[in-house]
Amino acid sequence: MTPRFIRPLPGALLGLLVAVSAATAQYTEPAKNKVGGSSNVKVLGHVPLGGFFRTMDVEIEEELSRPYAYASQSRDRPGFTILSLADLDNIKPIYHWRIENPELHGGTGGMDGKYFKLKGKYYYVQSLQFGQGGPDSDLGAVVADVTSLPDTSKIRIVARIRDAEHPGGFHNIFAYKHSDGRVLLFTTVGGPFANVYDMEKVLAGDAGALIGRVPIPANQTAGRGGYHDFYVAFDAETQQDKFYGAGRGGYFLYDVTNVGREEPTLLTSIVGASGISSGHTFTPTPDGKFAVTESEYQYAPLRLFDLRPGLSGEVQTISRPISAWTADWRALAHNHEIRWPYVFVSGYEDGLQIFNMMDPENPHTLGWYYTCMCKHQAGFGGVPVWEGTSVMNGAFGVDVRNSDGLVVITDSNTGFWAFRFEGFSGWNGKDWGMPNVSSVQNWDTGPEGVRGKTAAMVN
């Protein structure tokens, strides 16, 4: 198979279709059943976790002294599974948590999970989504104390985060070490905003743990609901904590440096782009100058945007991608992690995909491994009719351990996978002339560059 990419896209939808057609000319038709992978991607381990759409997102701890991964689980397994990576030749599940009386709970169940460290202890947050026909429709997440690992007998659920005003749970969450030292949890909710929780207050049972919200601009009426997903990062150049939210209307970038003390400030947005009425995922490069975005529908490529015109005030909003990438024009790429210049993608039917965005206008494929081993368009058909005819099937979540370059995938059907990408033995942004910024948090010291902030900004 040859590298696939789409050249820079015009603004009109017709232009998008022409660009996709042009890319198809470079595209080598994959085998009818996608199996195996490229020679530079090695499988280290595979653990089945229950079958069709029982496995959702994945999280891996960064410290090599804590070799654990967490897989969110759904349907009749609503909760999470902890896997030990201590022996990569023998990856195994060591702990399962399920909601009490799972048979009474409707809805998806476990969707997304994040770990964090606070005052020397380790915690895992599992987001949950349950329907209103059963118990816990107001339950957004549970917090587990996992400090004792590998001793699983001492794991305890120490907090439950509820939002009775917006039932339906939290679809996605992001745990962030703020530049002022707080551990914050950003969550989706059934409204046109994201909730922000102070996790120290959550653990203390403080009624004021919900400290703020990040809105979707009031003029964005396209699409439905609120945010779908987000990413939060410190920008050392501007000395700001920045929130990158994808949801109704497109993609929105806010300054959340003083979240909980004052309203977040909208810095720029991506709206009006052809083919995008709602954003799914919005991930910036370590320097915050470019972004990879997803919009969740069949045939949609990952679109790459230059954020600089919006951040500088050159344009009011950004509406044209500079390029796009897809593994298979017939399918759909899903979640992704940026470790500049590499982008690691959980590509639904296309499994793990890795592309290079060193030149953001010309992304190109580097490697892949098919984890789904499924028929085309035999995927998720919606709740409660799970088996359907969509391409939402296969690789769901992806994460990367910076300390040694371990790549993990959760496949909604086939379970948990671990990989090595040839030549990638770890990541630090400084090695690439970039800020050392990714989804991995430094829980002990906070974001790099914070020491450059003034006392007034920190306090």
Image (cartoon, grey):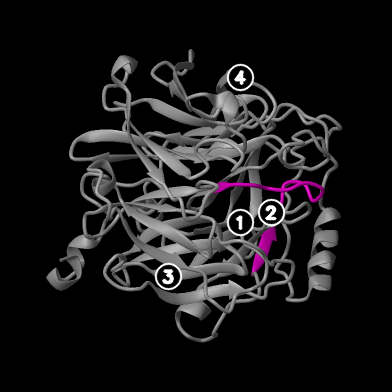
The amino acid pointed to by label 1 is His
The amino acid pointed to by label 2 is Glu
- For label 4, the residue is 48
- For label 2, the residue is 296
**Percent position of residue 403, x then y:** 36, 36
Q: Are marks 2 and 4 in contact (CB under 8 Å)?
A: no
Q: Are marks 2 and 3 in contact (CB under 8 Å)?
A: no
**Percent position of residue 129, x then y:** 55, 41
Name the disc covering residue 280, or none.
1
Residue at the location (62% across, 38% down)? Answer: 107
The amino acid pointed to by label 3 is Tyr
Part of the protein shown in magenta: 322-336
Looking at the image, which is closer to me, 194 or 400? 194
Alpha-carbon neighbours of circle 4 within 10 Å: few (<14), some, or many (≥20)?
some
Residue at the location (21% across, 49% down)? Answer: 445
Q: Is residue 147 visible to us here?
A: yes
Name the disc covering residue 254, or none.
3
Q: Which of the two labelled residues, at mark 4 and mark 1, occupies the earlier sequence position?
A: 4
